[in-house]
Image (cartoon, rainbow, N blue to C red):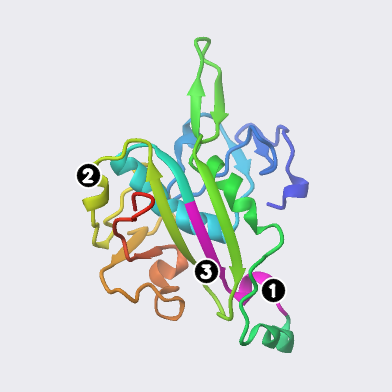
Amino acid sequence: MPQSLCFPTQITTDVTHMYPSSSSSSPLTFPSSHLMFAASQKGFIVTNTNCSTTGYVIPLAALENAFGAIEAVLVKTMQATSNAIYPGVVSLNILDKIIPHISGEEKIEWKTLKMLGAVAEDDHGVKSFNIHPLRVSAACNRVPVDDGPTECVSVRFARRTPAVTSARPRGHGSLHTGRQGSWIPVRPTACDCVHEEPDSPQPRLHRYYQDEAGVSVGRVGQSPVMDI
């Protein structure tokens, strides 16, 4: 739903709230990884987030589920021309170029905090939405690719244990968010595929995984500066 049409209101007896994504108290949800808000309201409609944030939050949620709270993230995006809605021949302007800035796309820094947020309940049973306390630094680049963003991500965990740096998940569905629900009709059978090949994933080869509802992950390993 367009953000301009979203405002807190009562729609029907089944849908009681609408949340604009710009509100600091509102969640950003998506079926693969962020279901905790579904149990906190009788019904609600939320605005969706952008593609580059959605794609990398799925493995982030899985890593946090396996190793505990994430403290900091560095992410470099390589975003396709399809996201820019370039019309026809104008898209040829991107050939032989990498544009090291996409206006507004650094919103991934605060949208990540909301998508990994949680619902808290006080002593009076009142529920509220809390954003995640991690820090995110993003650099967003436009590249000459038709479709499918690629992101290079480094992660630091709050508890830096040897198990974190030695972990190497492999195969389809090997990353588990801990938040998936079989009751969601649009949920893919496996949200992720972790590749062992050093040159994977690649947009042309892997963008249609799970009918474009899945995430391809590659080159999972220890970082000399962060953890993974």
Residue corresponding to mark 3: 149
Instruction: Between residue 95 and residue 19, name the one nearer to us.
Output: 95
Give the left or right position of residue 121, taking residue 68 as reference: right
Residue corresponding to mark 1: 85
- Tell me what residue is drawn at x 25 percent, y 40 percent: 161
Give the left or right position of residue 132, taking residue 193 as reference: right
Q: Quadrant of residue 206?
A: bottom left
Residue corresponding to mark 2: 162
In the depicted structure, whether residue 87 falls above or below residue 21: below
- Tell me what residue is drawn at x 33 percent, y 37 percent: 68
Is 33 in the magenta? no
Cα gap from disc 1 to disc 3, whole angstroms: 14 Å
Q: In the rendering, at what x and y percent does residue 99 appear?
A: 65, 73
In the depicted structure, whether residue 162 falls above or below residue 228: above
Q: Residue furthest right?
A: 4
Closer to the N terminus: mark 1 or mark 3? 1
- Tell me what residue is drawn at x 29 percent, y 56 percent: 222
Task: Please name the amino acid that badge 2 sits on.
Answer: Pro
Q: Quadrant of residue 95?
A: bottom right
Closer to the N terminus: mark 2 or mark 3? 3
